[in-house]
Amino acid sequence: MSRQGRSQLVLGIILILVGAWFFAEKTIPSLSDFADQYFQWPFTLMWIGALILLIGLLTGNPGMAIPAAIVAGIGGIFYYIETYASGQAWSYMWTLIPGFVGVGSIIAGLLGDHTRQNLKSGFNALIISAVLFLIFASVFGGLELLGNYGPAILLIGLGVWLLGRSLWKSFARKEEDNA
């Protein structure tokens, strides 16, 4: 089946499922009450992310996992801010977005889309995002994970990680050239 044929097939399935949902919601009122809690504004973004991933899987395009993870992750951030935190949390929560790219890249790699490259870049994005989150949360959010010296320790740790990674790559290249 061609890519266009798969896309039309997926779109047809999605339209049938959405229509069936609307039909069931009108037929069974208690279903509507149950679903209302899961279709509020932050959850809508998470559902859209899941839909993007489903479309990518059904059309054979695992790279769609990256935008799916970003959209769902931003929905998760909004849910967290609305439920548990204040608006000030956004001053450091944005640092999780590169981590969402990393999660999407890892999922795409696991689904067979340039596996080695996606896994490597995904884990790198997760590490950088985690360090940035800890630094910004320590500075702006009052996170006292490492005490008063938390941001300094995390910045030094990130620098050591980047230095070690650079040295590792240069030694690996030197060994490849000698082989």
Image (cartoon, grey):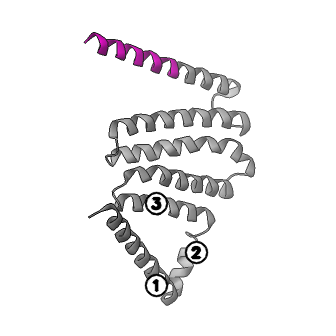
Q: Is residue 45 left or right of residue 150?
A: left
Specify the segment rendered in magenta.
Answer: 161-179
- 145 in relation to 4, above or below: above
Dot label at residue 24: 1
Magenta run includes residue 164:
yes
User: Would you say the residues marked 2 and 3 are in contact, meaning their CB atoms lie under 8 Å apart?
Assistant: no
Horizontal side of 25 relative to 93 (left or right) equals left
**Residue 52 point in image, percent of width and height:** 46, 60
Helix, strand or loop at disc 1? Answer: helix
Q: Residue at x 42, y 76 (%)?
A: 17
Instruction: Give the crowd class for mark 3: few <14, some 14-19, many >=20 residues within 10 Å.
Output: many
Hey, what amino acid is under mark 2? Asp
Which badge, 2 or 3, is on the more N-terminal residue?
A: 2
Q: Residues within 10 Å of mark 2 (few under 14, many from 20)?
A: few
Q: Which residue is mark 2?
A: 36
Residue 1 in picture, x, y percent from top left = 26, 64
Q: Which residue is mark 3?
A: 52
**Number of the front mark, 1 or 3:** 3
Closer-to-camera residue (178/34): 178
Q: Position of residue 158 (x, y in %)?
A: 56, 24
Discs 2/3, front: 3
Q: Earlier in the sequence, mark 1 or mark 3?
A: 1
Residue 33, given in percent of the width and then of the height, sits at: 56, 80
- For the residues labelled 1 and 2, the Cα–Cα distance comes to 14 Å
Disc 1 marks a residue whose amino acid type is: Ala
Image quarter of residue 146: top right
